[in-house]
Image (spheres, grey):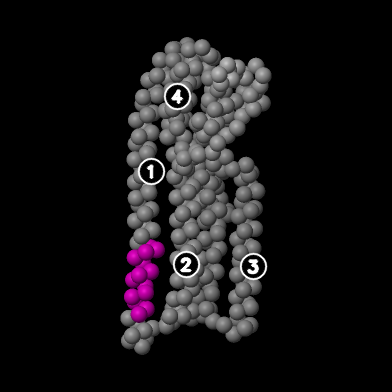
Amino acid sequence: MQTSGNTLLPDGNQLRTALRMAHIPVPYRDYLRWTVLAVVGAAAVYLAGIAYLTYAGYRILLFSVVPDAVTKIILFLLLTIGISGAFYCYPILVAQGRKTKIDLDLPYAITYMEALSTTMTLYEVIRKVYEEMDLFGEVSKEFGMIVRDVEFFGEDLNTAMKNLQRTTPSSNLADFFNDLALLSDSGGDITEFLAARSGFFRDVAEREQEMALQTIEIMAEVYVTAFVAGPIVIMIMILSQNLAGQGDLGNWMPLITFGIPIGAMVMIGILYILLPAENLQISRREVGDRERLDVPEPGG
């Protein structure tokens, strides 16, 4: 993705593209406005809380060597940078999670397209994949962008496929539609093409699954180090200092009380966004009279 400078965020084009890839229905300028409002609101709440604590005579000490005023400034910077960074990274993480889901389901969608291509036109095949949202998930949503461009915006099929190549987070899906558009223009055999690409993307999905497992392993190691071994080391240090008469448990209480639970929730949220989850929902679809099957009664 191309990048350019931005007055509020270091990479405006990347954020704009990530919003489209993540299918977040918020315009870029509105998202920036929400980010600024969230930062300003959090800063106002923080300053009001600090003013109350100062009026009540409380002091905030992270460590005994850090003055109270410096501690307040550090916490203010961490709060503002953390909120703005979270708003900036959220669409990118969602787009990355969608990419993983698309790459894993793409070979099954292509196999389904291969079976339908013998009796349907290419657009009808794409529309059938879009309609099978329960089976193909994020892949069906990407195919739905083509259906939208064709049926609502009046674009031809090749133009709609090229539009999808610019907005999909999956480079594999973009390459697939690029090759499919070229084949459609040249009048090649679409069924043979889909059969060949199905095997190729099945291998790609296996590699993507391995990468997802490696991501889980890395995140698990980070979690154990930061939120299991780290607190144990801190507790040992506190006990050692208290035995020597030099420790102050109150300085560590904010980190123990708030830092560990918030960090754990952030790790869980990142894993939930990045890694694909199994679709265990049970859907119900109304069937029309012409699609209804005649099932004989038992014993009839």
Above or below residue 243? Residue 142 is above
Q: Image quadrant of residue 105?
A: top left
Nearer the observer, disc 3 or disc 4?
4
> Where residue 44 is drawn, which disc sits there?
3
- Magenta highlight range: 226-239
Q: Can residue 153 be seen in this view?
A: no
* Residue highlighted by disc 2: 259
Q: Which residue is drawn at 53% across and 46% down?
A: 91
Marks 4 and 2 sit apart, C-alpha to C-alpha, by: 46 Å
- According to the picture, the residue beneath numbered tag 4 turns out to be 110
Q: Mark 1 points at which residue?
A: 212
Residue 132 point in image, percent of width and height: 54, 28
**Dot placed on the residue nearer the N-terminal end, 2 or 3:** 3
Principal SS element in the magenta part?
helix
Image coords of residue 142 (percent x, y)? 54, 32
Going by the numbered disc 2, the residue's amino acid type is: Gly
* Residue type (three-letter) at the residue carrying disc 1: Ala
Q: How far apart are marks 3 and 4 (CA)?
A: 52 Å
Residue 212 place in picture, x, y as percent:
38, 43
Which tag, 3 or 4, sits closer to the chain's start? Answer: 3
**Does dot 3 land on a helix, a strand or a loop?**
helix
State the SS at label 4: helix
Q: How far apart are marks 3 and 1 (CA)?
A: 40 Å
Please name the residue shown 56% across and 21% down the image: 298
Instruction: Indicate yes or no whether the magenta region holds residue 196.
Output: no
